Image: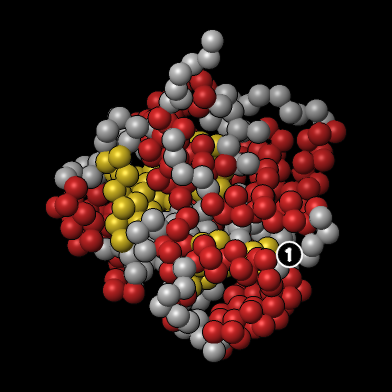
Amino acid sequence: MTPSSFSNRGNISSFLAMDVMREVNMLQQTGQDICHLEVGQPSTRAPQVVLEAAGHALDSELIGYTDALGLDELRQALSTYYFKTYKVNVSPERFVITTGSSAGFILAFLACLDAGQKVAVTSPGYPAYTNIIKSLDLSPVAIPLGQENDWSLSVAGLHDAEKLHGTIDALLMASPANPTGTMLTKQALTDLSLDCAQSGRWFFSDEIYHGLTYSQEAVSALQVGDHDGLIVMNSFSKYFSMTGWRIGWMIVPPKMVRPVERLQQNLFISAPTLSQYAACAALTTAAQDELQKHVELYQHNRDKLFTCLQNNGVTNIAPADGAFYLYADLHSLSPSLESETFCAQLLKEAKVAATPGMDFDKERGARFVRFSYARASDEIDRAVDRLNGFLARFQ
């Protein structure tokens, strides 16, 4: 006899970008040449010193459990990194090493919120935010962003959401953002952080795309107001090119260290030890020199892809201040275009994979497509050539 039903916690939307990637991988196994613009995975490898550190850890058999909060040397290295990068003093004791940023979200939500409480997220936004929130019996509140508000959240927008949905217990946001790449101004970030502090609202700042900026550096929430309701999440996946290493970190208020530690002990025990040793090397000067070349590559890719889309009539694109995405409005080509059909045809006919906007915005995403430019330069060149041919039909 089998159970008659499954938990509602698993009744969440799939991560569409990952579904597309799986389909593309299957097509590639049949010998097809596909350009990967669908997923935010750097084509660049982790820095050489990271690989060497991992090899040394393996040779030394330093791969047992660590303390739940993480290696002391990694937490100290992160504290030093924050002082050098952001000019803020953060005690190593406040850092929690996590299994990617995804585990950080889970730990933060479980430590700070109870079932039924409301978490505001921006829309479009990273789909896993909403799905994790729902699976933990929390209530997501989507705040729409678009050209009308420069793709940026404001305190007024947050207050408008509260008028519609009631008290919001936490705000989760990213700057630079996925899928738009848009970055908040320092003043906007300051205002939001202050409003959360004054309202007793948790402020979860996802800073995973820090380092991947092209005109000005991203501002950490720690720089504009470190308070007892602020939790910063980050990861070695994007800027550090370590997606598969599954290693990230949180910065939590002193009073939250022990509750988060207890949750980590019971849910994850500790983050992957091998990845923790490798991450220590990622924070060195030698690694930073190599990583800066990655940023230069992404900026070059962004400019090529942006020009291609603009020249072919895709003129409404969110400001790509950082990250490695272009979020493009298909209605500048034709008001009848829908992104799922467009992406399916683009993959089938031009062998270019992209992610439909419905993954990021259930209300208005049908008219948008996200293109990732985190690939090698030659792959972006091939994608541009194919897009030129494919988009010509709409002229």
Residue at (77%, 41%) from the top-left corner?
54
Residue at (57%, 42%) from the top-left corner?
100
User: Quadrant of the image for the N terminus?
Assistant: top right
Colour setup of the view: secondary structure
Q: Which residue is mark 1?
A: 34
Horizontal side of residue 362 vs 17, given as left or right? left
Q: Which residue is the extreme one toward the top?
A: 1
Q: Provide residue 359's location: percent of width, then percent of height.
A: 47, 55
Q: Provide residue 379's location: percent of width, then percent of height.
A: 74, 71
Q: Provide residue 382's location: percent of width, then percent of height.
A: 73, 76
Residue at (56%, 48%) from the top-left corner?
235
**How many discs mark residues in the rendered view?**
1
Residue at (40%, 58%) from the top-left corner?
361
- Please, is residue 142 above or below residue 253 in the view? below
Horizontal side of residue 135 vs 394, given as left or right? left
The residue nearer to you, when weighing 219 against 20, is 20
Residue 97 in view of the camera:
no
